[in-house]
């Protein structure tokens, strides 16, 4: 199809089609085990589910950038089944096959989860294997989601929920204990690999288990308003404390805050192989307003004192403009690996509308702004849901000066049209 024709068709679909649902920021620690996310049209009452997705993408590159159009075929499957009373097997995998114009085809496999669970009673659970551990009350940035580092393997959508769900789990041992008003979780993750693998079919243990880690998570409901979750995380050279708390402000609005802090090196020092360890904190604060007609709007402020401040960010940009781009490139690469903020302050406005005017039509989108360099990114998604298939259109736009947070993206705009069939 001619590029202009496909672009026109994509924009037309954006005006009439749907989206991913708003991200659920409820406290995940009160679950005995993480439940893989079910697609909106997936059949119920089965211990497995799967779908195939075909997508085509167009890109508008910036000057002198080489950003090819693409085609993708994805196969996604989840098995969550009981082996015997008290025993559970969870397998979750995604295979993305990419075909790039002018480039070699590539397949990337993401083993999200593969673990065995044992539940001796209703209050206790033990899991062993690869688990996608997700924490955080924030919608677009989660400083207390410690296991997100190195977890992204194949990015098919800018949707924060998709990034959170479709990532590699870490190999670990997890024990959980529940009581009437709270929960306690202990996680130990061993060192299993050295460096991340470039092999698309590899288990990539060097990315998910690069060193030994442990995490303790506790929550207790003191009252309707005071129901925080506390986290204590350790990795070589650093111990961090975290907190998540959401509260019902009125019948239509929920406020939330997320915090993580401790003695750690700055992101700039990490990218340069240096150690400037000091106490640094990151936090998120936001509120979600939900209407009776299924429209939700979230406004979120994001802060990370380990990220580059205005002077450091400007210095990196100036060096890159003068031909010494190595430090800038290493810093950007580290940001992608850690899913971190590029600069210290950012904000996001997110909206999601399920059944937008008609049943089966979902719309969503966000606007992110870097509050240090004023660059911004916009994303829109539209999805039409049926009982067996979804038709989805996405548009991503990056705005900003060269080498700014979003202005440095090789593509000024991206479009994607996808057809998903559920089995």
Image (cartoon, rainbow, N blue to C red):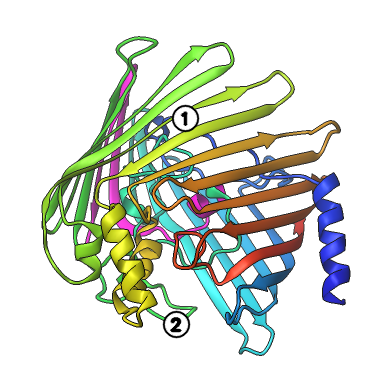
Is residue 382 visible in the rendered image? The answer is yes
Q: Which residues are magenta?
A: 161-190
State the CA–CA distance, disc 2 to disc 1.
Answer: 35 Å
Q: 389 left or right of 140? A: right
* Circle 1 Cα neighbour tier, 10 Å, few/some/many (<14 / 14–19 / ≥20): some
The residue singled out by tag 1 in the image is 26
Q: Position of residue 208 (x, y in %)?
A: 33, 64
The residue sitting at 61% across, 48% down in the picture is 47
The residue sitting at 85% across, 45% down in the picture is 16
The residue sitting at 53% across, 48% down in the picture is 160
Between 362 and 224, the one lying in front of the other is: 362
Q: 250 left or right of 372? A: right
Between 55 and 33, the one lying in front of the other is: 55
Is residue 308 visible in the rendered image? The answer is no
Q: Quadrant of the C terminus?
A: bottom right
Q: Secondary structure at mark 1?
A: loop
Q: Earlier in the sequence, mark 2 or mark 1?
A: 1
Q: 131 left or right of 139? A: left
Q: Position of residue 288 (x, y in %)?
A: 54, 26
Q: Position of residue 286 (x, y in %)?
A: 45, 29
| Circle number at residue 199 | 2
Q: Position of residue 79 (x, y in %)?
A: 56, 54
Q: 300 left or right of 124? A: right
* Prevailing secondary structure of the magenta residues: strand
Q: Which quadrant of the structure image shows residue 268? A: bottom left
Q: Secondary structure at mark 2?
A: loop
| Circle number at residue 278 | none
Q: Is residue 348 magenta?
A: no
Q: Quadrant of the N terminus?
A: bottom right
């Amino acid at each position: 199809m001619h590029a202009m024709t496909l672009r026109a068709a994509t924009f037309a679909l954006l005006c009439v089609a749907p989206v991913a649902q708003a991200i659920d920021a409820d406290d995940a620690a009160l679950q005995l085990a993480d439940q893989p996310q079910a697609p909106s049209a997936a059949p119920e009452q089965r211990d497995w589910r799967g779908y195939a997705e075909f997508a085509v993408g167009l890109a508008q590159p910036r000057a002198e950038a080489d950003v090819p159009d693409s085609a993708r075929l994805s196969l996604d499957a989840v098995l969550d089944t009981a082996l015997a009373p008290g025993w559970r097997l969870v397998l979750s995998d995604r295979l993305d096959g990419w075909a790039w114009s002018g480039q070699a085809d590539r397949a990337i496999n993401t083993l999200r989860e593969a673990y065995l669970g044992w539940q001796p009673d209703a209050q206790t659970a033990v899991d062993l294997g690869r688990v996608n551990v997700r924490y955080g009350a924030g919608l677009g940035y989660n400083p207390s989601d410690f296991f997100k580092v190195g977890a992204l393997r194949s990015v098919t959508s800018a949707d924060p929920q998709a990034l959170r769900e479709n990532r590699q789990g870490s190999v670990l041992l997890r024990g959980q204990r529940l009581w009437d008003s709270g929960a306690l979780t202990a996680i130990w993750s061993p060192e299993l690999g050295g460096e991340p693998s470039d092999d698309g079919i590899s288990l990539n243990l060097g990315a998910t288990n690069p060193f030994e880690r442990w995490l303790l998570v506790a929550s207790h409901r003191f009252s309707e308003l005071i129901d925080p979750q506390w986290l204590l995380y350790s990795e070589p050279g650093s111990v961090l404390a975290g907190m998540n708390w959401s509260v019902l402000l009125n019948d239509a609005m929920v406020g939330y805050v997320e915090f993580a802090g401790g003695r750690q090196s700055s992101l700039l020092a990490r990218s340069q192989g240096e150690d400037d360890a000091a106490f640094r904190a990151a936090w998120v604060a936001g509120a979600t307003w939900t209407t009776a007609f299924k429209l939700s709007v979230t406004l979120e402020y994001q802060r990370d004192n380990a990220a580059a401040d205005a002077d450091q960010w400007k210095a990196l940009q100036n060096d890159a403009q003068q031909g010494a781009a190595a430090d800038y490139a290493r810093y950007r690469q580290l940001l992608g690996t850690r899913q971190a903020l590029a600069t210290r302050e950012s904000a996001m406005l997110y909206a999601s509308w399920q059944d937008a005017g008609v049943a089966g039509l979902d719309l969503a989108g966000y606007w992110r702004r870097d509050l240090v360099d004023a660059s911004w990114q916009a994303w829109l998604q539209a999805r039409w849901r049926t009982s067996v298939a979804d038709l989805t259109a996405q548009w991503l736009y990056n705005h900003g000066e060269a080498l700014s947070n979003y202005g440095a993206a090789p593509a000024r705009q991206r479009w994607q049209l996808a057809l998903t069939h559920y089995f």
